């Protein structure tokens, strides 16, 4: 099922309007900055939750950090794949 989970959107959208390099890089910078801020916030929330012995805060912080980390990995893979 993993082979069918990705769709060939890049191949289908080759003929569509392609954004310029500056638009692509501006989007990449903004998305990476937001992902890093969420990642740092999640880690700091997890640390504060551990210090204050609050399980809910710790789990929420770790969930944010893990999700942002996965987004950062996806952005990195997309940047290396399109270059």
Image (cartoon, helix red, strand yellow):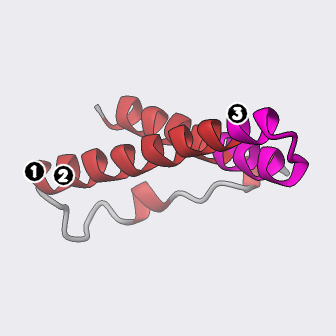
The percent position of residue 44, horizontal first and vertical second, equals 60, 37
> Can you tell which mark lies on residue 47?
3
Give the number of the mark in front: 2 or 1.
2
Q: Which residues are magenta?
A: 46-66
Judge depth for marks 2 and 3 and give the one in front: 3
C-alpha span from label 2 to label 3: 32 Å
Residues at marks 2 and 1 touching, judged by CB atoms closer than 8 Å = yes
Circle on res. 26: 2
Q: Residue at x 71, y 46 (%)?
A: 61
Find the distance from the CA under tag 2 to the CA under tag 1. 6 Å
Number of residue marks: 3
What secondary structure do most residues of the magenta stretch adopt?
helix
Return the residue nearer the eye: 8 or 74. Answer: 74
- Front residue of 53/65: it is 53
Label 3 CA crowd tier, 10 Å (few <14, some 14–19, many 20+): some
The residue beneath circle 1 is: 22
Q: Nearer the viewer, residue 24 or 70?
A: 70
Q: Earlier in the sequence, mark 3 or mark 1?
A: 1
Q: Where on the picture, by quarter, is residue 15? A: bottom left
Q: Residue at x 54, y 34 (%)?
A: 73
Residue 68 position, x and y percent, is 58, 45
Mark found first going from the N terminus, 2 or 3: 2
- Residue pictured at 66% horizontal, 44% vertical: 45
Residue shown at 85%/51% (left/top)? 1
Question: Is residue 62 part of the magenta span, yes or no?
Answer: yes
**Residue 17 at what x, y percent from top left?**
19, 70
Label 1: element kind: helix
Residue at mark 3 to residue at mark 1: CA–CA distance: 37 Å
Callout 1: 10 Å neighbours few (<14), some, many (20+)? few
Instruction: Name the mark nearer the viewer: 3 or 1.
Output: 3
């Amino acid at each position: 099922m993993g082979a069918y989970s990705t769709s060939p959107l890049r191949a289908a959208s080759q003929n569509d309007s392609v954004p310029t390099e500056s638009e692509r890089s501006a989007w990449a910078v903004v998305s990476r900055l937001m992902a890093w801020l969420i990642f740092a916030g999640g880690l700091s929330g997890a640390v504060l939750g551990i210090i204050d012995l609050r399980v809910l805060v710790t789990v929420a912080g770790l969930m944010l950090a893990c999700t942002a980390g996965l987004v950062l990995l996806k952005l990195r893979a997309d940047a290396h794949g399109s270059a």
